[in-house]
Amino acid sequence: DAKTTQPPSMDCAEGRAANLPCNHSTISGNEYVYWYRQIHSQGPQYIIHGLKNNETNEMASLIITEDRKSSTLILPHATLRDTAVYYCIVRVANMNNNAGNMLTFGGGTRLMVKP
Amino acid sequence: NAGVMQNPRHLVRRRGQEARLRCSPMKGHSHVYWYRQLPEEGLKFMVYLQKENIIDESGMPKERFSAEFPKEGPSILRIQQVVRGDSAAYFCASSPRTGGEQYFGPGTRLTVT
């Protein structure tokens, strides 16, 4: 799986949008971009994933550049409960390939939402 | 729909004892993954199982560690003769299909004294 690069930490004011960047310049055509977060030693929480189109769900939006070499996770109105480590993960999702389906976690971005 | 369940949530073992960690996947999920998070480190993949089969154990230590996912019942991660370096949080995740998104349980925190 391709490697990702994220800033180690970011701050965001409560109520404002949090924009978390991720670089994945070696991503392959069959690799998806996944985002998870881990709140204070809890189990990681799935947020969103995408291949090449922008995606939105009730938690966040995912913006993927046209060349797919980078992406941004957007939390539109950050709250104090969004303080967590956010992980950007690139992963092959080949339904016919049982091997290599694990998630490879890097260092992530520690997002601190401040009042 | 209950999420992924893990028990116990906290487990204390003395050096040399055995640790058994259990994971019940979400309803309808037949794919289970185990990850380990050492103190102040990121999560590392250990093993991927489907019902009655180990699919990928490339992240498992070569000795003392084993995993199973029987036809009936939870998945079990077993650590024999625990050492202090095994102290960590062990997370289980389940997925409804190969390559699908993974949903994590709350973890089991193992402390070896």
Image: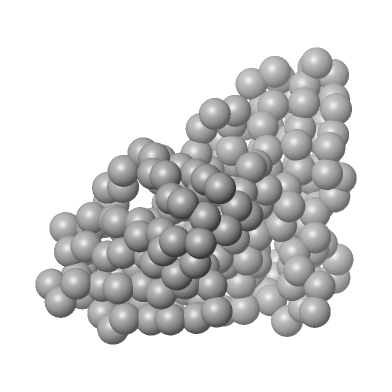
Q: Quadrant of the N terminus of chain B?
A: bottom right
- The location of residue A107, given as percent across then percent down, is 41, 40
Q: Quadrant of the C terminus of chain B?
A: top right
- The location of residue A67, given as percent across then percent down, is 13, 72
Residue A65 in the figure: left or right of residue A111: left
- The location of residue B77, given as percent across then percent down, is 73, 47
Which residue is rendered at x = 31% and y = 43% of the image?
A7
Q: Residue furthest left?
A: A67
Q: Is residue A59 above or below residue A25?
A: below
Which residue is rendered at x = 63% and y = 54% of the image?
A81
- The location of residue B73, given as percent across then percent down, is 86, 66
Residue B56 in the figure: left or right of residue B17: left
Residue B17 in the figure: left or right of residue B105: right
Q: Is residue A108 above or below residue B50?
A: above
Residue B22 in the figure: left or right of residue A40: right
Which residue is rendered at x = 27% and y = 65% of the image?
A71
- Kindly tell me whether residue A30 is visible in this rendering: no
Q: Is residue B17 above or below residue A73?
A: above
- B43 or A14, which lies in front? A14
- Quarter of the rendering containing residue B12: top right
Q: Is residue B34 above or below residue B100?
A: above
